[in-house]
Image (tube, grey):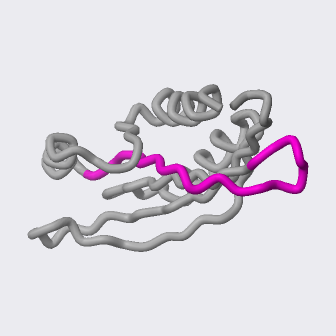
């Protein structure tokens, strides 16, 4: 279970050299991004669910990619899909994209939320 969590985080950090946080940005991290440009990943984990196999459970993993001024966003989306899907027992489900306005500015960032499903054997829990 921990191997999947650390594997997802490591593959994103190593491949993109961007900030990767779990759950939400801290105030100091958000301030730094506001100054330097919004380019980071936020990882969130959903509820555990039964799976088709009695010996495993599944959990949705949400990877939010916040991107400002990236001309190659589509290529990066494909890279993220490929990299995270290569983590053991993690599979791609869907993406959802939108644009957000940076607070108190006229700047906008792209947000792509990836949904992955990870399968966790009961032996690992």
The relative height of residue 66 versus residue 15 in the rendered view (above or below) is below
Q: Horizontal and vertical percent for residue 74?
A: 55, 59
In the figure, residue 56 lies in which quadrant?
Answer: top right
| Residue 104 left/right relative to 97 | left
In depth, the one of 62 and 38 nearer the eye is: 62
The relative height of residue 65 versus residue 18 in the rendered view (above or below) is below
Number of numbered discs on residues: 0
In depth, the one of 17 and 75 nearer the eye is: 17
Q: Is residue 52 on the magenta stretch?
A: yes
Q: Which residue: 17% across, 52% down?
A: 34
The relative height of residue 24 versus residue 103 in the rendered view (above or below) is above
Q: Horizontal and vertical percent for residue 26?
A: 22, 44
Q: Which residue: 72% across, 43% down?
A: 90
Quadrant that contains the C terminus: top right
Question: In the image, which residues are magenta?
Answer: 38-57
Quadrant that contains the N terminus: top right
Q: Main secondary structure of the magenta part?
A: strand
In depth, the one of 66 and 75 nearer the eye is: 66
Q: Is residue 46 on the magenta stretch?
A: yes
Q: Which residue: 41% across, 31% down?
A: 17
Q: Which residue: 21% across, 42% down?
A: 29
Q: Residue furthest left?
A: 104
Q: Horizontal and vertical percent for residue 37?
A: 23, 50
Q: Horizontal and vertical percent for residue 81?
A: 64, 50
In depth, the one of 3 and 12 nearer the eye is: 3
């Amino acid at each position: 279970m921990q191997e999947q969590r650390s594997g997802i985080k490591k593959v994103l950090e190593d491949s993109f050299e961007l900030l990767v946080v779990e759950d939400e940005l801290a105030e100091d991290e958000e301030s730094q991004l506001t100054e330097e440009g919004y380019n980071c990943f936020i990882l969130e984990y959903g509820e555990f669910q039964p799976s088709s196999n009695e010996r495993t459970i599944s959990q949705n993993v949400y990877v939010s990619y916040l991107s400002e001024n990236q001309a190659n966003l589509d290529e990066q989306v494909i890279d993220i899909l490929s990299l995270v899907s290569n983590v053991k027992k993690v599979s791609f489900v869907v993406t959802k994209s939108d644009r957000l306005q940076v607070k108190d500015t006229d700047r906008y960032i792209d947000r792509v939320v990836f949904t992955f499903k990870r399968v966790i054997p009961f032996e690992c829990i």
